[in-house]
Image (spheres, grey):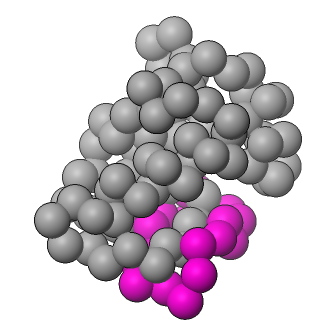
Amino acid sequence: MLKPYKDGFALDVYLQPKASKDEIIGPYQEALKIKLKAPPVEGKANKALISFLAKRLSLSKNHLKIISGLTSRRKRIYIEGLTKEEIFKRLGIS
């Protein structure tokens, strides 16, 4: 789910767009399942995912980047500026 990548970590995410609310569900098929209200059109769900994670991690959006899965539900997000323990704690996962 979370692996070292360059100067930070890569987080595998399974995204469910068009949900009733924005929330982290938890581990799902070796990824972190996240539900977002944003629709999967014109990059809206991707932008919402970066904003959602930046807020949860208390980071600037500049510290997050989608490195794979732009058009898929399965995405890999690059996170820099936090330790593995801080990421887990701020996302509420173990």
Residue 72 coordinates in the image, percent (x, y): 26, 63
Residue 17 coordinates in the image, percent (x, y): 40, 77
The answer to whether one can see residue 79 in this image is no
Q: Residue furthest top?
A: 7
Q: Is residue 30 above or below residue 33?
A: above
Residue 87 coordinates in the image, percent (x, y): 72, 35
Q: Is residue 26 above or below residue 17?
A: above
User: Magenta segment range?
Assistant: 14-31
Q: Nearer the viewer, residue 84 or 50?
A: 50
Q: Residue furthest left?
A: 42
In the image, is 83 to the left or to the right of 48?
right
Q: Residue at x 55, y 89 (%)?
A: 20
Total labels: the figure holds 0
In the image, is 78 to the left or to the right of 54?
left
Q: Residue at x 15, y 65 (%)?
A: 42
Q: Residue at x 62, y 17 (%)?
A: 81
In the image, residue 18 lies in the stretch drawn in magenta: yes
Residue 13 coordinates in the image, percent (x, y): 49, 55
Residue 78 placement: quadrant: top left
Q: Nearer the viewer, residue 45 or 84?
A: 45
Q: Nearer the viewer, residue 30 or 86?
A: 86
